[in-house]
């Protein structure tokens, strides 16, 4: 049996893609993303694929992408969460008033290094508590998730309003703002180091997966295929770092920062942004969530429950508690997204996160998460968020009128799901 | 069948289950000895599935008690049942269609590495071993089980029950969806498990399977136990009479 290959069909023709064991669906989504980018690049006379725009696109995607990873778990377990935008607003409000009102009242002045961590912990706790409450109402009291989170959409939006009396709260703590995007980047050298570490991690992961297969005498890919996989991942990682490192800080911004330190800027001095902290946060979230989905019992139970809730129950899985866990995780991710979103604005505004629930659900669904449950990937949801954001900002750059922008995004959502259904029928997944 | 004096493996005493006003199971007592196959028979809605689900932890009983090896036990959920080495093969198979064979086999009891992560390759290796014993033709280890045939899915469900050292096995119409070849395979497996001293409750509609496989048969009708007979002492006509008319044959115990 060990000699039998990993392919299922008795006479499966081995194409190059099959040998590489690439995910064809992932390739399709990357293809769609590349097409979107190239089309906008032509329409904007090359302004779309500049380091500057790619940088902006990346930091604009982070908040929605973070929540979309959690939405994958929610939808996989056959639930929905309509409240994420409002939850984001409440978490953002809690973090904003913690750092501008509560902590200063306790004697921690502006600029105190404890302000940012305490505010973040308060935000995360708020998200976790509200998420757990949603999960308890859905799992233990059997109220449909649609209703609980529809109520939550109204409740938490207005709790945020009440907490802040509808006012904009800012400026936020300087350390806190580092996670907003352009305000906090690791610089060129740091970015290359991170890139190197990422490539090393990818290589180790590939080697270990191969070793585990050999240890159990499972069929393995030919060595050249593993090598190609390593080369592609290294190229992607270094390409991404190089692009972000190519976006140079404008001269006037640099000159101002030198002046602030009482120095004069040397002639011809340049510096680039590199990878933003918020993007590192998103990457960390993506890695952790992928690990949870694929390698932990929690992830296995999430997918099993989505595939067949009765079977999960009969296998001894506590599906009610699982619902609480999934929504708690969603709440924590909303808090992280709130951190990034408010830090990017440098203040909390009353309308922060409005309509984010729809963007997040759309990102997850465009990324291949099936509303029937049981199917979905973390990388898909992040790619989905990136595709949505590219469409939106690309159209804005081209100068498409606002109503048409939303008409296009809405249509793309429906068409993407249709394409996914056709793809699944062809491959027999449905 | 001579060892009737020792303690039964399972004893369900005076079990009642009501749904709303309907008594689905009405004061029924059954028992099972090691190395024995007891058939549970009756029409649809006679209450046999409801009764047996109390043992597998999927249903709660209103009254009655369960004894395992003579000791009273509390079974409130499937996890409790698994703790007493009670394994169930459900008629619906209870498989998560989107997961592969190994994930289903170990569902709820995943093997983990020292780091706390799941050990997928070890689970797949174990699955290959047990499937090699049960159904040597099984090759689709990487596909989600929804891509498998009825017989292959059945093998996964059976593998899950036998892999974890079951001492008490509940099979709810294990051959209903199977072709003749696979039915024969299940029959051989039941013989093998019996020889290992495992006690089996077999819910079955096909009277020929009952005559072939079971040592005793307990027949239910309208939630009540009609009677329990030694299969060797009666004819299939007698058993059909019990199922249809609720009539106990004269010489029955």
Image: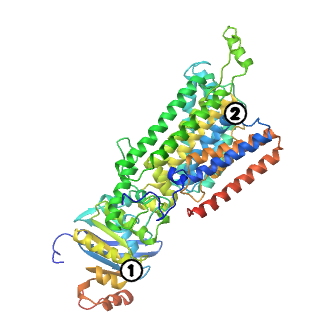
In percent of width and height, residue A230 lies at 51, 40
In percent of width and height, residue A195 lies at 54, 31
Q: Secondary structure at mark 1?
A: helix
CA gap, disc 2 to disc 1?
64 Å
Chain identity of mark 1: B
> Which of the image's four quarters has the C terminus of chain B?
bottom left
In percent of width and height, residue A178 lies at 62, 26
- Number of other residues with Cα within 10 Å of mark 1, as a class: few under 14, some 14 to 19, many 20 or more: few
Q: Is residue A278 left or right of residue B192?
A: right
Q: Are marks 2 and 1 on the same chain?
A: no
Q: Is residue A169 left or right of residue B97?
A: right
Q: Residue at x 35, y 89 (%)?
A: B240
Q: Secondary structure at mark 2?
A: helix
Residue B114, compared with residue B205, is above or below; it is: above
Where on the picture, by quarter, is residue B6? bottom left
> Which of the image's four quarters has the N terminus of chain B?
bottom left
Q: Is residue A161 left or right of residue B195?
A: right
Viewer can see residue B109:
no
Q: Residue at x 43, y 41 (%)?
A: A207
Q: Residue furthest front?
A: A224
- Return the mark for residue A56: 2
- Return the mark for residue B180: 1
Residue A11, compared with residue B185, is above or below; it is: above
Viewer can see residue A241:
yes
Q: Is residue A377 left or right of residue A393?
A: left
- Return the mark for residue A379: none
Residue B153, compared with residue B238, is above or below; it is: above
Seen from the viewer's position, the closer of residues B239 and A30 is A30
Chain identity of mark 2: A
């Amino acid at each position: 049996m060990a000699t039998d290959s990993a392919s299922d069909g008795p006479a499966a023709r081995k194409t190059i893609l099959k040998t590489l064991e690439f995910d064809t669906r992932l390739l399709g989504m990357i293809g769609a993303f590349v097409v979107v980018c190239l089309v906008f690049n032509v329409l904007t006379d090359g302004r779309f694929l500049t380091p500057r725009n790619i940088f902006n696109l990346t930091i604009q995607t982070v908040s929605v992408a973070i929540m979309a990873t959690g939405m994958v778990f929610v939808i996989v377990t056959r639930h929905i969460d309509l409240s994420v935008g409002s939850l984001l607003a409440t978490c953002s409000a809690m973090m904003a008033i913690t750092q501008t009102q509560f902590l200063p009242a306790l004697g921690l002045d502006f600029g105190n290094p404890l302000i940012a961590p305490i505010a973040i912990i308060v935000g995360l706790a708020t998200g976790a508590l509200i998420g757990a409450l949603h999960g308890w109402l859905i799992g233990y009291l059997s109220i449909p998730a649609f209703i609980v989170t529809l109520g939550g959409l109204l409740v938490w939006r207005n709790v945020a309003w009440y907490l802040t009396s509808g006012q904009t709260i800012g400026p936020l703590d300087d350390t806190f703002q580092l996670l907003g995007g352009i305000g906090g980047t690791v610089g060129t050298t740091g970015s290359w180091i991170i890139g190197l570490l990422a490539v090393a991690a990818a290589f180790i992961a590939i080697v270990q997966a191969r070793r585990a297969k050999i240890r159990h005498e499972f069929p393995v890919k030919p060595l050249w295929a593993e090598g190609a996989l390593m080369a592609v991942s290294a190229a992607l990682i270094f390409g991404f770092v190089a692009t972000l490192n190519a976006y140079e800080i404008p001269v006037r911004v640099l000159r101002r920062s030198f002046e602030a330190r009482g120095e004069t800027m040397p002639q011809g001095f340049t510096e680039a942004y590199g990878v933003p902290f918020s993007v590192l946060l998103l990457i960390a979230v993506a890695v952790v969530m992928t690990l949870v989905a694929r390698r932990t019992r929690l992830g296995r139970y999430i997918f099993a429950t989505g595939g067949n809730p009765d079977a999960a129950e009969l296998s001894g899985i506590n599906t009610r508690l699982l619902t609480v866990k999934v929504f708690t995780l969603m709440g924590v991710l909303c808090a992280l997204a709130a951190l990034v979103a408010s830090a990017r604005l440098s203040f909390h505004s009353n309308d922060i996160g409005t309509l984010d629930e729809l963007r997040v659900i759309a990102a997850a669904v465009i990324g291949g998460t099936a509303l029937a449950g049981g199917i979905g990937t973390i990388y898909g949801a992040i790619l989905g968020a990136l595709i949505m954001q590219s469409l939106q900002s690309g159209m804005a750059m081209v100068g498409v009128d606002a109503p048409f922008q939303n008409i296009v995004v809405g249509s793309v959502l429906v068409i993407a799901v249709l394409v996914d259904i056709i793809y699944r029928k062809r491959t027999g997944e449905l | 069948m001579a060892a009737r004096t020792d303690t039964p493996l399972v004893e369900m005493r005076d079990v009642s289950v009501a749904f709303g006003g309907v008594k689905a199971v009405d004061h029924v007592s059954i028992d099972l000895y090691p190395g024995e196959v007891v058939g549970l028979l009756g029409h649809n809605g006679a209450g046999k599935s409801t009764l047996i689900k109390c043992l597998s932890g999927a249903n709660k009983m209103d009254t009655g008690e369960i004894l395992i090896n003579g000791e009273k036990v509390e079974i409130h959920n499937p996890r409790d049942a698994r703790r007493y080495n009670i394994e169930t093969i459900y008629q619906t198979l209870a498989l998560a269609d989107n997961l592969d064979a190994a994930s289903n086999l170990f569902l709820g009891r995943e093997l983990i590495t020292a780091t706390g992560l799941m050990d997928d390759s070890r689970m797949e290796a174990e699955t290959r071993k047990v499937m090699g014993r049960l159904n040597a033709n099984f090759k689709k280890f990487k596909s989600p089980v929804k891509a498998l045939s009825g017989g292959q899915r059945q093998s996964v469900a059976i593998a899950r029950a036998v892999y974890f050292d079951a001492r008490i096995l509940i099979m709810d119409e294990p051959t209903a969806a199977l072709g003749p070849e696979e039915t024969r395979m299940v029959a051989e497996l039941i013989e093998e498990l019996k020889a290992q001293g495992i006690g089996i409750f077999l819910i079955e509609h096909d009277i020929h399977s009952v005559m072939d496989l079971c040592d005793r048969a307990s027949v239910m009708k309208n939630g009540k136990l009609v009677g329990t007979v030694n299969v060797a002492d009666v004819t299939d006509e007698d058993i059909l009479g019990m199922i249809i008319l609720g009539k106990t044959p004269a010489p029955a115990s």
